């Protein structure tokens, strides 16, 4: 039995890249796996597979190895890192979306990488504003522009060794960044050139590309918005790393930090340790989630 990673799945066929090699096998799923109610394989899944025909590079997926995480939409598994792309201008930053994506990362055990793009359009201190909003989260922040291609090297360093997907509003430059990475740092295989020939076809599917120096980038359509509804309002505070040092010091046990007296998080905010926008968006999201919870039995 061989081991590999699914680069792409289309119509019941899966392209499996063999671990430690560069052979790609087209695989179906073993019948018994489906009969036993096995889970559907996703791009990004690590699998064991049996080689059926070495010359034709055909195989059969035997087993899906344990997942680190997965998403149904887009259908992808085992994301290590999410590059959250936000542009300085056109479109202007959707900070609430960035906050929600960070919550998703923490809940799914994914490392966030905040990418500030379109730096060339910064006329109003926009880069600094975004940096300031997320500085105390401790998450890494990068600045990019398609007009300064050298800067993509910074991104490349963060990509090595990780399976990275891109998320962010439409128009922020995700495809532009992805294409720059594909051009410079992705393993040349038959697979890649075939993909280039088929052009637009890929936009509807998730596809992984292996980086020359290790790791993968994931081309995932529709990774632009997320629901954080699965996070309970009482737990929301745990997804804000910049709150965590202090939440035990609030006067009230179970303090929501949305307006109670002697709130340590509020104090942090007053001292400028929590960004104003971040704090107010937390309160907004808290109220939104609480309302959904309070109305859970209504229709
Ligand atoms: N000024 C500027 N425009 C950019 C930059 N990166 C991408 N764009 C443009 O922004 C538009 C949307 O880019 P695209 O990559 O399709 O965004 P996506 O929707 O996130 O995939 C295109 O016209 C790009 O040429 C950048 O760094 N600076
Ligand atoms: Mg795009
Ligand atoms: Zn509090």
Image (cartoon, rainbow, N blue to C red):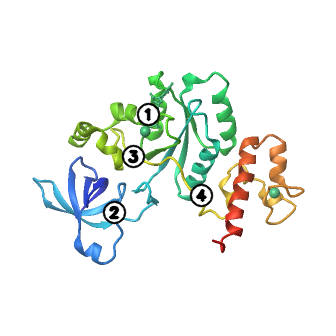
Query: How many residues crowd mark 1 within 10 Å: few (<14), some (14–19), many (20+)?
Result: many
Q: Of circles 4 and 3, which is in front?
A: 4
Q: Is residue 191 left or right of residue 215?
A: left
Q: Marks 1 and 4, Cα distance to the nearest angstrom?
A: 26 Å
Q: Residue at x 57, y 58 (%)?
A: 107
Give the image location of residue 231, x and y in percent: 62, 62
Instruction: Determine whether label 1 and label 3 are within 8 Å by CB.
Output: no
Does label 2 or label 4 sit earlier along the sequence? 2
Q: Residue at x 68, y 32 (%)?
A: 129
Please tell me in which quarter of the rendered image ligand 3 is found. bottom right
Q: Does the beta carbon at disc 3 come under 8 Å from ligand 2?
A: no
Q: Which mark is residue 41?
A: 2
Could you say which is closer to the camera, residue 138 or residue 229? 229
Does label 1 or label 2 sit earlier along the sequence? 2
Q: Which residue position is annotated with label 4?
A: 228
58 lies above or below 31: above
Q: Which residue position is annotated with label 1?
A: 177
Q: Which residue position is annotated with label 3?
A: 218
Give the image location of residue 252, x and y in percent: 85, 64
């Amino acid at each position: 039995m061989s081991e590999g990673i699914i680069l792409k799945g289309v119509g019941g066929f899966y392209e499996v890249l063999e671990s430690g090699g560069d052979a790609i096998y087209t695989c179906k799923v073993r019948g018994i796996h489906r009969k036993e109610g096995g889970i559907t394989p996703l791009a990004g899944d690590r699998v064991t597979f049996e080689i059926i025909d070495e010359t034709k590079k055909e195989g059969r997926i035997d087993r899906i190895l344990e997942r680190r995480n997965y998403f149904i939409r887009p259908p992808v598994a085992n994301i290590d890192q999410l590059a959250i792309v936000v542009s300085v201008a056109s479109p202007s930053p959707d900070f609430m979306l960035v906050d929600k994506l960070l919550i998703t990362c923490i809940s799914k055990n994914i490392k966030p990488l905040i990418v500030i793009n379109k730096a060339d359009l910064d006329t109003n201190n926009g880069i600094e504003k975004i940096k300031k909003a997320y500085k105390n989260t401790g998450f890494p922040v990068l600045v990019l522009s398609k007009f300064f291609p050298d800067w993509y090297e910074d991104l490349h360093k963060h990509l090595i060794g990780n399976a990275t997907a891109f998320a962010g509003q439409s128009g922020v430059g995700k495809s532009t960044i992805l294409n720059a990475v594909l051009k410079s740092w992705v393993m040349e295989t038959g697979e890649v050139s075939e993909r280039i020939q088929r052009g637009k076809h890929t936009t509807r599917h998730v596809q992984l590309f292996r980086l020359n120096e290790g790791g993968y980038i994931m081309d995932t359509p529709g990774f632009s918005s997320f629901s954080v509804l699965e996070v309970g309002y009482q737990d929301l505070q745990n997804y804000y790393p910049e709150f965590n040092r202090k939440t035990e010091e609030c006067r009230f046990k179970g303090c929501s930090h949305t307006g109670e007296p002697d709130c340590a998080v509020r104090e942090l905010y007053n001292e400028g340790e929590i960004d104003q926008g971040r704090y107010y968006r937390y309160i907004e999201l808290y109220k939104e989630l609480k309302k959904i919870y309070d109305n859970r039995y209504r229709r």
